[in-house]
């Protein structure tokens, strides 16, 4: 298709622009002008007069940032830019063929919305930090706070940044500014060649393998009614995996374009993954839903965390984040089916990791079995949740869920009720199995009783709450060693008490030097508790 040819052509041209920029352009001001001109050229070639929408949306954001000085400024910018983006999403939804894809302006506008709104929040974070000495923002808010507002040239160069114009990734303004003013980083050649190779691999997979497992077959009557449940589940899993190949190809290619210009070097980890949008192996081999999602569309995840997740009430964080993600993507029903289901499965997966996983981690064999089971389950759950995102339409998505018997939905809702009960049961069992405290020995160091009490016979043993007779040698037992401090009795035992109760070790104590040795202290305490003479040893 023409749009695919245009996309590849523009990305190759952008790669050439990046290599030229790194080789010959060093001055920050020149970098800004070069980035702006190249971005405008690519945008005009691909979208023609639709570039007006980029200018209008970015201009609206710029005016609101400059004119509005209230603390609600970021939310106003977010609302205005999301409204503009939504109007174009709805236009495309009602006037384009369902499920069709073209290289239209909504893609760059989605990335632009992330850029402008994240900049607004970063500017407000900096203002809040200056106002309060006890600023309580998150680590991310502190890290990406923009202390100095961008100039007119900086802003528009940031907007039309050619490296990420077509397919992202999101580059936060602070990272962009550091890139413009920095020219000291190692050669990106190895990273660029590697990412280009991986991108080509996924392009071949998408062209050769994806047609064999066409996502369109999920809508066919024959597939829904004339196949077995296991076959349908297997086919959905493979088909959605093959669909991801095109995203891997586009995002990894865009990452290579960024790196070729010198953008994307992480000084902390000393790797070229600062703006990496996807980790294909991390996603496909993730042992649980969180690990996989952390490797997918990282730029969008970072944006959602920066503008929504860390700024709303904790009780609605997950739902609000998924809702914002759905609106940002568009208004096809399939998006909302995916994100509503995703919020449920994310919550359940979090409970499973918290309650169930600790039961397996202490045994290596059990942990391997648990990890394999959760990896396999995660593959099926991801396919089960995301196929509606690809199908887009409501009726085919619901029909396929019904033909899959809504199996994972039932399992998820069952787990939501069962896991709290399991957690409560484990806590109760843990309380019952805890060892009881040993009998407290009252030492000579404790307060004396009232002087009016009658004196006790001096032949009696020292005062204790419970007096234990000294066992015979044949009855002597050796205490077990363990981690529970209460098992060994109180640590108030003294040499005087032990020597008074056990004359057989009195001579040792008289001749020994003072020591804080842990083993000696433990042995003395054990002797005081068990009522028998235990051989003392040091070291």
Image (cartoon, rainbow, N blue to C red):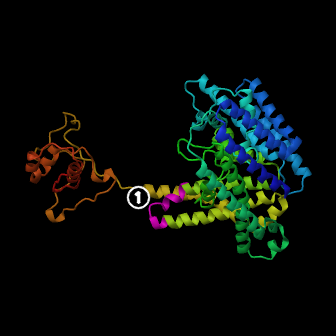
Q: Nearer the viewer, residue 166 or 413?
A: 166
The image shows residue 111 at horizontal and vertical percentages of 75, 43
The image shows residue 471 at horizontal and vertical percentages of 17, 60
Query: Is residue 313 shown in magenta?
Result: no
Q: Is residue 284 above or below residue 501?
A: below
Res. 311 in view: no
Q: On the image, which quarter does residue 77 sit in?
A: top right
For image coordinates 70% across by 71% down, the residue present is 234
Q: On the image, which quarter does residue 62 sit in?
A: top right
User: Does dot 1 land on a helix, a strand or a loop?
Assistant: loop
The image shows residue 439 at horizontal and vertical percentages of 28, 51
Query: Is residue 365 shown in magenta?
Result: yes
Q: Quadrant of the N terminus?
A: bottom right
Res. 139 in view: yes
User: Circle 1 is placed at which residue position?
Assistant: 433
Magenta extent: 354-366
539 relative position to 230: left or right: left
Q: Of helix, strand and loop, which mostly describes the magenta segment?
A: helix
Q: Residues within 10 Å of mark 1 (few under 14, many from 20)?
A: few
Q: Is residue 129 above or below residue 190?
A: above
């Amino acid at each position: 298709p023409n749009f695919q040819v245009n996309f590849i052509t523009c990305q190759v041209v952008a790669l050439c622009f990046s290599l030229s920029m790194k080789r010959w352009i060093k001055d920050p001001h020149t970098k800004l002008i070069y980035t702006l001109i190249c971005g405008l050229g690519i945008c005009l070639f691909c979208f023609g007069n639709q570039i007006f929408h980029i200018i209008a949306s970015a201009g609206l954001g710029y005016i609101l940032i400059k004119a509005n000085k209230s603390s609600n400024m970021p939310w106003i910018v977010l609302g205005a830019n999301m409204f503009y983006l939504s109007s174009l999403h709805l236009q495309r939804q009602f006037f384009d063929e369902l499920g069709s894809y073209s290289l239209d302006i909504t893609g760059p506008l989605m990335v632009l919305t992330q850029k402008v709104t994240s900049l607004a929040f970063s500017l407000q974070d900096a203002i809040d930090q200056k106002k309060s000495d006890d600023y309580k923002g998150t680590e991310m808010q502190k890290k990406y706070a923009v202390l100095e507002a961008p100039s007119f040239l900086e802003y528009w160069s940031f907007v039309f940044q050619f490296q990420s114009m077509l397919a992202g990734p999101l580059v936060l303004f602070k990272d962009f500014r550091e890139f413009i003013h920095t020219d000291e980083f190692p050669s990106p050649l190895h990273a660029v060649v590697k990412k280009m190779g991986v991108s080509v691999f996924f392009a071949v997979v998408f062209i050769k393998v994806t047609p064999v497992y066409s996502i369109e077959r999920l809508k066919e009557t024959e597939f829904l009614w004339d196949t077995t449940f296991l076959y349908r589940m297997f086919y959905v899993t493979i088909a959605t995996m093959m669909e991801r190949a095109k995203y891997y190809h586009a995002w990894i290619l865009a990452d290579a374009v960024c790196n070729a210009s010198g953008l994307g070097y992480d000084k902390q980890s000393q790797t070229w993954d600062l703006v990496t949008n996807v980790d294909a192996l991390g996603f496909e081999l993730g042992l649980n839903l969180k690990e996989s999602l952390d490797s997918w569309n990282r730029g969008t995840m970072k944006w959602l965390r920066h503008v929504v997740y860390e700024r709303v009430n904790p009780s609605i964080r997950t739902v609000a984040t998924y809702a914002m993600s759905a609106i940002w993507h568009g208004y096809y029903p399939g998006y909302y089916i995916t994100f509503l289901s995703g919020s449920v499965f994310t919550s359940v997966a979090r409970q499973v990791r918290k309650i169930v996983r600790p039961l397996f981690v202490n045994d290596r064999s059990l942990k391997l079995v648990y990890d394999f089971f959760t990896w396999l389950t995660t593959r099926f759950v991801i396919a089960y949740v995301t196929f509606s995102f690809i199908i887009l339409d409501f009726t085919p998505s619901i029909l396929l869920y019904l033909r899959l018997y809504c199996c994972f939905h039932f399992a998820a809702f069952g787990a939501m009720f069962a896991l709290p009960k399991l957690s409560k049961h484990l806590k109760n069992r843990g309380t019952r199995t805890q060892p009881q405290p040993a009998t407290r020995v009252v030492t000579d160091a404790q307060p004396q009783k009232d002087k009016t009490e009658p004196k006790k016979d001096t032949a009696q043993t020292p005062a204790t709450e419970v007096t234990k007779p000294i066992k015979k040698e044949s009855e002597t037992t050796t205490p077990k060693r363990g981690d529970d401090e209460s098992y060994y009795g109180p640590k108030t035992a003294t040499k005087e008490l032990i020597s008074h109760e056990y004359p057989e070790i009195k001579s040792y104590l008289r001749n020994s030097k003072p020591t804080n040795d842990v083993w000696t202290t433990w042995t003395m305490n054990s002797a005081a508790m068990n009522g028998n003479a235990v051989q003392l040893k040091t070291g």
